[in-house]
Image (cartoon, rainbow, N blue to C red):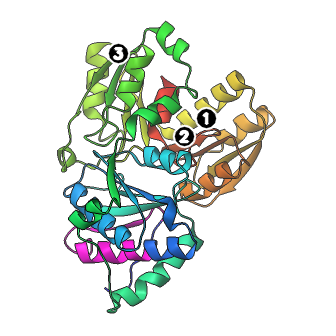
Amino acid sequence: MDSIKFGTSGWRAIVAEDFTVRNIRIVCQGIAQYLRQQKLGQQGILIGYDARFLGEHFAKVAAEVMAAHGIPCLICDRDTPTPAISYHVVSRKLSGGMNFSASHNSHEWNGIKFTPDWGGPALPETTKAIELRILPLLHGEHIKWLPWERAAHDGMVRHFDPQPEYLKALESLVDHDRIRNGRIRVIFDPLFGTSRHYLDEFLRQAGAKMAVLHHWRDPYFGGFRPEPTDETLQDLKETVRREGAHLGLATDGDGGRFGIVDADGTFIQANYILALLLDYLIRSRQWTGGVARSVATTHLIDAVATHHGLTIHETPVGFKYIGELLARREVVFGGEESAGMSIQGHVPEADGILAGALVA
């Protein structure tokens, strides 16, 4: 390879073609060198992975490189949603986080999502700095890693369960009483992805009656892309109708995107859900300030925001730009047409788990 480039949400490639152990080590060393240059290495990094093939192994490969550069590592003890990693980066004041995920892409893809210390997707100035460090590594510069057993013996790596604290944080953002009093019946489809035992567990604790489809890890995602679209949610739509549920919820492979099905089994486009959620949140929480949406997202959001006296910020495509505004507290809500959203007081990262809980 002549170069490795980060896209709108990290670096992605096809497994065994460009997504190889050597290239993973190269990308991780680029990140490690960037963190050390920023004097952030000692704060540690959280490393996770989604449900794809060899996720645990890739996480260990990353930890070996980080440990060789003196960066302590927390390794998620199971496949983990990206927003949960983002939450812990912020709450634990870590130097950053990494998730081995290709999000909604099909099973032959994998990727590395890098979350800097502020908790959102890495911005272009960060990824360009990492890419510059990657170039000499691609052309023969020495790559350092510490064997896993040595890293563990030296206390540089330890396992970590991110789920309990993340779900606890959601409690302050979602109206439990409304869910409990509504006695709603919900069908949830995580599409074999990382949100298993996250969104369903949260809503069950809140008092919803839950049923879950595809609630086991499948690196092939049932043969479909783990993307919550009208086409991929046929099982969810049919189950909602058959069981007489009030609502169907879905998330993508790493928990960043959401999908919503109403009581008659109709898939509701993300643009409509974003506008409805914004209106509900402004009315119920008396929000003031700004609202962010990507350039490709519906202007219904503008209409809702303007009606309530809030200002609109239009961003380029990519949740990182919305996340930056959330982190700066310039907006109270951000969403994009590809079914990503977050709110003030939460992580500056797209969170399909939060979106599903708010819709419920």
Image vertical order of residue 174 relative to residue 107, above or below? above
- Please name whichever residue, 240 or 27, is drawn nearer the observer in this view of the structure: 27
In which quadrant of the rendered image does the N terminus lie? bottom left
> Is residue 68 found left or right of 54 in the rendered image?
right
Q: Residue at x 52, y 32 (%)?
A: 169
Which secondary structure, mark 2? helix
Tag 3–tag 1 contact (CB < 8 Å): no
Residue linked to disc 1? 275
> Is residue 55 found left or right of 283 in the rendered image?
left
* Dot 3 crowding, Cα within 10 Å, few <14, some 14–19, many 20+: many
* Dot 1 crowding, Cα within 10 Å, few <14, some 14–19, many 20+: some
Which x, y percent locates residue 298?
Answer: 60, 45
Tag 2–tag 1 contact (CB < 8 Å): yes
Gap between marks 3 and 1 measured at Cα: 23 Å
Tag 2–tag 3 contact (CB < 8 Å): no
Which x, y percent locates residue 259?
Answer: 41, 36
Residue linked to disc 3? 245
Gap between marks 2 and 3 measured at Cα: 23 Å
For residue 343, say whether it is visible: yes
Q: Amino acid at mark 3?
A: Ala
Q: Amino acid at mark 2?
A: Asn
Which secondary structure, mark 1? helix
| Magenta segment boundaries in residue numbering | 8-30
Image vertical order of residue 265 relative to residue 79, above or below? above
